[in-house]
Image (spheres, rainbow, N blue to C red):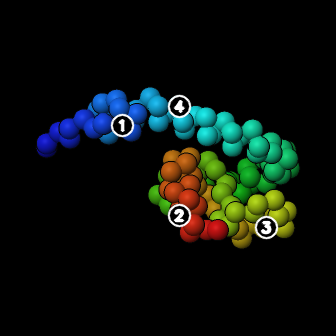
Amino acid sequence: MPIAPPRRCACGHTVPARERCACQKRRDLARKARYDAKRPSARQRGYTSEWQKARADYLKAHPYCVMCGAIADTVDHIAPHKGDQRLFWDRSNWQPLCCLCHSRRKQRQERCGANS
């Protein structure tokens, strides 16, 4: 299998193939920090002890990830609720996901606008 050559970052540094430059990592951290500073807390978004109980019951009834079949550990809202409590508590809008699918596949779908 051929090895990809290093590439030149926009800042001028040479970066090994399939790696990110330190300047790109710093920009990402700063962008995420700005987003998190504006974002309400989990409790303010509705993730209370009542949610934890409902989540545990749901995962007990639906133990497997709907995307890959692994053990589910996350209850995902199929359509983002965006603060709508009716949609937040609508169990037909919930799906069990494993951490990997929630962190990678589902987030990618949302960025592409599949569930807006």
**Residue shown at 44%/29% (left/top)?**
22
**Residue contact between numbered discs 3 and 1, judged by CB atoms under 8 Å:** no
Please give the residue where the numbered disc 4 appears in the rendered image.
26
SS of the residue under disc 1:
loop
Vertical placement of residue 46 versus 78, above or below = above
At label 2, counting other C-alpha atoms closer than 10 Å, the crowd grade (few under 14, some 14-19, many 20 or more) is few
Q: Quadrant of the C terminus?
A: bottom right
Image disc number at residue 112: 2
**Residue contact between numbered discs 2 and 3, judged by CB atoms under 8 Å:** no
Q: Which badge, 4 or 1, is on the more N-terminal residue?
A: 1
Whether residue 30 sits left or right of residue 17 in the image: it is right
Say what amino acid the circle numbered 1 marks: Cys
At label 3, counting other C-alpha atoms closer than 10 Å, the crowd grade (few under 14, some 14-19, many 20 or more) is some
SS of the residue under disc 3:
helix
Please give the residue where the numbered disc 3 appears in the rendered image.
87
**Residue shown at 25%/35% (left/top)?**
6
**Residue shown at 74%/52% (left/top)?**
55
Say what amino acid the circle numbered 4 marks: Arg
**Residue shown at 56%/55% (left/top)?**
107
